[in-house]
Image (tube, helix red, strand yellow):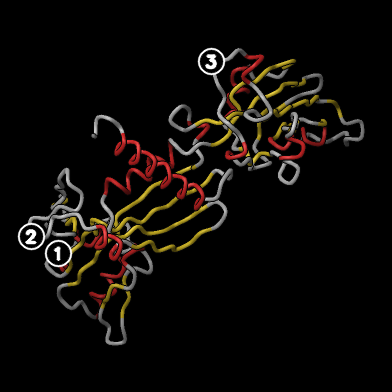
Amino acid sequence: MSNIVNIEYNRVTNTTSTDFPGFSQDGDNAWDVQKFKNTFDINISSIDERDANFDLVHVDTSIANAFRRIMISEVPSVAAEYVYFMNNTSVIQDEVLAHRIGLVPLRVDPDMLTWVDKSLSDEEKFTDENTVVLSLNVKCTRNPDAPKDCTDPKILYKNAHVYTRDLKFEPQGKQKESFANRPVVACDQDILLAKLRPGQEISLRAHCILGIGGDHAKFSPVSTASYRLLPQINITQPITGESANRFQECFPKGVIGINSKGEAFVEDARKDTVSREVLRHDEFEGKVKLGRVRDHFIFNVESTGAMTPEEIFFKSVRILKNKAEYLKNCPISQ
């Protein structure tokens, strides 16, 4: 079986796979750990506090997709789960405002909290070890110093807009010491929660706990975790002159280059979006083949801000490893 998924004008071929990762009719099908160690590779293209772009090379689709799914739905993070309203005279209903607060990403290390035992009563299940408390107390008033001809509500009124920076951390028990160096705040301070007018106010407390994205999207530590297969562009016949310029325009900028002889060459196939635009032109028929490398995955992980992308990926690896250990040791597999 070829390692390339063929991209043709109106179809995609060589897409079939088997239930056995790495199986090939014309190759050695025995699983070899040492061979996997020698061929497997990770290449990091870019990484910062919020985004990471890296390649997983020579790994099966099932493993790559497992990492993607685990990062989205099984890596724990902290979010508001219970919101208690003391007063809300704004135009936003309690349920809608509670939902908005729940979706706010919080900068808190999930390893610092334990899981809530939901079988206990409300008086017992929330402790300083498993719950973070945030409060929101905002009242809108008129600004006596506002210019008479002003129409901007931000100037006319005080606290006209309620932002995530207005959520205040209330340490409980030992949290004053454990969170002393890194108090809990929203990852993004300027997310708009509500708009108020004079006389309206919001007073509430939110209990934030551990959860996973499989239970609710607010617990997912990533905004997006996706992958794509590495594009492959194979120029089978020389393309030169004006034809080379037209060929270059069929691809995104930086994919095709033209050398000093005026001949087109593949500069960086990674930047290609595989739009198949080049296959629409008769002059390039038989001169180029498009495809994707079956076992080369380009990952893009965007964190919500609670954890760095590499930490999220490492945790997904540990979770998958624990799943494999459980499957290996469970009675059914014996």
Q: Whole-Å distance between the Cαs marked 2 and 3?
A: 56 Å
Name of the residue lying farthest toward the bottom: 261
Q: Whole-Å distance between the Cαs marked 2 and 1?
A: 35 Å
Q: Of discs 2 and 1, which sits in the foreground?
A: 2
Counting from the top left corner in percent of width and height, residue 127 is at: 67, 24
Q: In this view, does 261 lie to the left or right of 143?
A: left
Q: Whole-Å distance between the Cαs marked 3 and 1?
A: 68 Å
Of pointers 3 and 1, the one earlier in the residue sequence: 3
Counting from the top left corner in percent of width and height, residue 301 is at: 45, 50
Of pointers 2 and 3, the one earlier in the residue sequence: 2
Picture disc at residue 282: 1
| Residue at x 70%, y 29% (from the top left corner) | 134
> Dot 3 corresponds to which residue?
119
| Residue at x 55%, y 21% (from the top left corner) | 117
> Dot 2 corresponds to which residue?
26
Dot 1: what SS?
helix
Of pointers 2 and 1, the one earlier in the residue sequence: 2
Q: What residue type is labelled 3?
A: Ser
Res 101 quadrant in image: top right
Dot 3: what SS?
loop
